[in-house]
Every structure is written in C-alpha cells, then in structure tokens.
Amino acid sequence: MNIHNMNIRSIHIIILGILYDGPKHGYQIHKCLDDPNGIGAVWKIKITNIYGLLDVLEKDGYIVPSKQLIDDTTYPPKKYFEITDRGKEIFQQWMREPVKHGREIRQVFLSKLYFANKESAEVAHQLILDQIKECNQWLVNSKQLPDGGVEFVKIVNSFRLMQMKSYITWLEELKKK
C-alpha cells in the first residue's frame, strides 16, 4: 500500500496514531489533539472538524466502530472507533518516512517524531537519521537551482539554503539526545 497514491492527509493519519493506543470517541480524540504537552503543541483542530475526519477514515476502511465493550454510561452512548489493520499499516508507513518538503517540518515531521518517540527511541532515532539524509539531499538539489542573475531569485534561494541548513543543524542536535 503506497500512502503517496492515496487521498489521505496528515491530519487523518494523526487520528490513526491517536487510535493506535486503543478505541476512543470523538471528544477523546479532540482532547488528545488539544493537549499542549502532546500533539496539540503542533496541531489545532476544532472538534466539529474531527467528526468529518472520522467519517472519511471510516468510509475508507482505516477505522471501524469499536466492538470492544466500553464502560460508557452516557445516553445516548458515544460511538467509539478503533484502528483497522489497514489503518495500522498506513500509519506505520507514514510515521517512519521522512517528510519530502521543508514546509512539512513544522507540523508533519514533528507529528511523526511525536508518535515515533511513543513507539520507541530506536524508531525516533531512525526517523531523525532518515530526515537528515533527506534534508542533505534538499541541499544538494538547491545548489543546482539556477538564479538567472535575478537578484530576488538569489535572495529566495539564499533563504531556502539557510532554512535547510538550520533544519539539518536542529536534527543533528536531536540526534544527540
């Protein structure tokens, strides 16, 4: 299953990561996404949007209503969801791949690192190593960009180059921890 050929966004996969620990209902998922000491440090999602995301994940077979008996005394009872094997597979693939664009470092890479750290220090370390390799490739590719002698393009390329170098410096620091 190739995640890149699918119509699924990172926020969908993050919900799969939240469900990886066990069944949850929409509000519990929202609380995880809203936790400033967890994934909420990089994502802000309104609770009303979560239910639409859950519908997409359920329709595509990544989650199903939980059959597990959950002690829920509310009325009407809440709908709990659990991740399917297909959802687990796509989540694991996503979590272990470095991001392909610098603009994804702030939210997507940090989300991957959050879940990788939850899984194990080894998985997190490998993700960091793979991301360093990817960023170094960005550097190689950026040095080949023509500027055409246009001053503004030189400024833009200089900015991108410094940004990539700062990503690598930051990742090298993470690798030491």
Image (cartoon, rainbow, N blue to C red):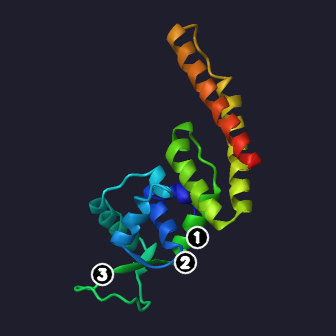
Residue in the image at 73% along x and 54% along y: 125
Q: What residue is shown with label 1?
A: 89
Per the rendering, the mark at residue 78 is: 3
Label 3, secondary structure: give it.
Answer: loop
In this rendering, position of residue 171 left or right of residue 63 = right
The Cα atoms of the two marked residues, 1 and 2, are separated by 6 Å
Q: Nearer the viewer, residue 129 or 2?
A: 129
Q: Position of residue 111 (x, y in %)?
A: 54, 54
Q: Position of residue 128 (x, y in %)?
A: 69, 49
Q: What residue is shown with label 2?
A: 85
The Cα atoms of the two marked residues, 1 and 3, are separated by 26 Å
Label 2, secondary structure: give it.
Answer: helix
Judge depth for marks 1 and 3 and give the one in front: 3
- Which quarter of the rendered picture does the N terminus lie within? bottom right
| 74 versus 57 height, above or below | below
- Compare marks 3 and 2 and give the one earlier in the sequence: 3
Q: Mark 2 belongs to which amino acid?
A: Asp
Q: Mark 1 belongs to which amino acid?
A: Glu
Quarter of the figure with residue 113: bottom right
